[in-house]
Image (tube, rainbow, N blue to C red):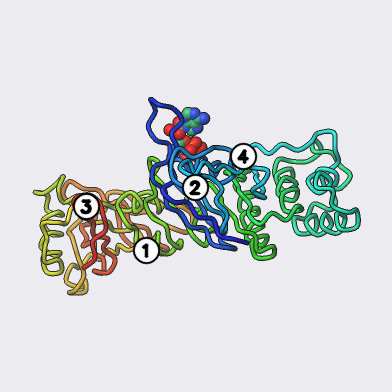
């Protein structure tokens, strides 16, 4: 299947409204599992609808393979039914008067696929999604999660080269969600379908995607593997959006005079020649360590004096709240902390754990 390319894609819903999507370049490779991730209103659904052809562009172009699908300047717009993509939205609509089997082969009948092939394909997807046993039931006799699986099966049966999914798991409880994520990964591996998946849930994106595109206010913030996004966030927005508990940020501009900002400033001046450019530093909670004996901290580490102000067990993990000067830091650990609230500690991190951002919030590398 061909790749999907968006070039300078733009969407404006009305003369007086802000752009829902601005100048978006996106390349979605064959067989990729691309998650569009970002907070509510950032333009994820609009992007998916533009790819599907349910919205036309206000600017820019969309190509699928070597075929132009949408371009204002070239006066081209290919309607959704000619783009050969499967769509599953949050509210999937099954036909209530048709059995699960008939729902599943609906698209194939519509396309006048011969009976033998139709039956073979329906059997295959029903097996893959484990819904064979519901063949003769009606949608109202199935749970929400089972219905969602039927909606997916119906899409897969027509063997679309591209599957577009908009928060398809949002109606499910935590356990089913997890099961369906595993299911989707299996489907992706088995059917080798290119998937574009919209979610505001960072865990969902991290567990499913081969590539994540993080969006904010209609613009692309970063595109990369889940590891890239987590380990090398391109800017503060990405760093703060991905990760739970969220990354600790030492804002060197906002609290210039605080002991922690000064300690950080002194530490960074050895590594960053143009310290003037540094605006903030991010430290992931799991990258922090504590020691009651400051002299035991490795000499190369960044360290701050702090007081333990809270210990929060989260079932097998612990979150420690630490106060350093005016700032609060959160640390996560898998080991039961042998320390009491009120203890004075050195909180430290290895230099490579520091995410350094300039005054505009863009990543700086030493
Ligand atoms: P959510 O996760 O809440 O669905 P999203 O990231 O998918 O959000 P979009 O639905 O793409 O975001 O919306 C992006 C922006 O475009 C928002 O400001 C939204 O209010 C606006 N918008 C979306 N659809 C329309 C529409 N049909 N008419 C006018 N404005 C719209």
Q: Quadrant of the N terminus?
A: bottom right
> Is residue 182 shown left or right of residue 200?
right
Please state the horizontal and vertical placement of residue 22, each as a whole percent of the image.
Answer: 39, 42
Closer to us: mark 2 or mark 3?
A: 2
Q: Residue furthest front?
A: 74
- The residue at 40%/52% (across/down) is 242
| 2 or 3: tag closer to the N-terminus | 2
Residue shown at 89% from the left, 44% from the top: 136
Determine if the C-beta at disc 1 is less than 8 A from ligand 1: no
User: Could you say which is closer to the camera, residue 327 or residue 70?
Assistant: 70
Can you tell which mark lies on residue 319? none
* Secondary structure under the numbered disc 1 in the rendered image: helix
User: In the displayed structure, would residue 291 be above or below residue 342?
Assistant: below
The C terminus is located in which quarter?
bottom left
User: Which x, y percent locates residue 278?
Assistant: 16, 56
* Of residues 275 and 29, the one drawn nearer to the viewer in this rendering: 29
User: Looking at the rendered structure, which numbered label has been put on residue 231?
Assistant: 1
For the residues labelled 4 and 2, the Cα–Cα distance comes to 14 Å
Q: Position of residue 52 (x, y in %)?
A: 59, 44
Q: Is mark 4 within 8 Å of ligand 1?
A: no
The residue indicated by pointer 2 is 201
* Residue annotated with mark 3: 250
Q: Label 4 belongs to which residue?
A: 90
């Amino acid at each position: 299947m061909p790749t999907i390319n968006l070039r300078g894609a733009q969407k404006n819903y009305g003369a007086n409204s802000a752009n829902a999507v601005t100048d978006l370049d996106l390349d979605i490779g064959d067989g990729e599992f691309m998650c569009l991730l970002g907070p509510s209103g950032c333009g994820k659904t609009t992007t998916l609808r533009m790819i599907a052809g349910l919205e036309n562009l206000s600017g820019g172009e969309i190509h699928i393979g070597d075929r132009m699908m949408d371009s204002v300047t070239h006066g081209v717009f290919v309607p959704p039914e000619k783009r050969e993509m499967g769509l599953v939205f949050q509210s999937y609509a099954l036909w209530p008067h048709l059995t699960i089997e008939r729902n599943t082969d609906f698209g194939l009948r519509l396309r006048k696929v011969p009976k033998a092939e139709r039956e073979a394909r329906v059997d295959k997807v029903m097996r893959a999604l484990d819904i064979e046993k519901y063949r003769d039931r009606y949608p109202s006799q199935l749970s929400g999660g089972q219905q969602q699986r039927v909606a997916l099966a119906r899409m897969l049966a027509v063997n679309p080269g591209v599957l577009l999914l908009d928060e398809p798991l949002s109606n499910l409880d935590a356990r089913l969600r997890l099961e369906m994520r595993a299911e989707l990964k299996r489907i992706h591996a088995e059917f080798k379908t290119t998937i574009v998946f919209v979610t505001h849930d960072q865990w969902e994106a991290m567990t499913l995607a081969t590539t994540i595109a993080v969006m904010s206010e209609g613009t692309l913030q970063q595109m990369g593997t889940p590891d890239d996004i987590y380990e090398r966030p391109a800017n503060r927005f990405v760093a703060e959006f991905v990760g739970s508990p969220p990354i600790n940020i030492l804002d060197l501009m906002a609290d210039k005079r605080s002991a922690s900002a000064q300690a950080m400033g002194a530490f960074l001046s050895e590594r960053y020649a143009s310290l003037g450019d540094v605006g903030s530093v991010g430290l992931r909670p799991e990258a922090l360590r504590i020691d009651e004996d400051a002299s035991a901290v490795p000499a190369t580490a960044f360290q701050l004096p702090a007081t333990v102000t809270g210990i929060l067990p989260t079932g097998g993990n612990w979150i420690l709240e630490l106060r350093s000067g005016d700032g609060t830091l959160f640390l996560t650990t898998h080991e039961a902390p042998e320390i009491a609230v009120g203890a004075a500690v050195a909180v430290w991190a290895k230099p490579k754990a520091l995410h350094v951002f300039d005054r505009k919030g863009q990543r700086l590398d030493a």
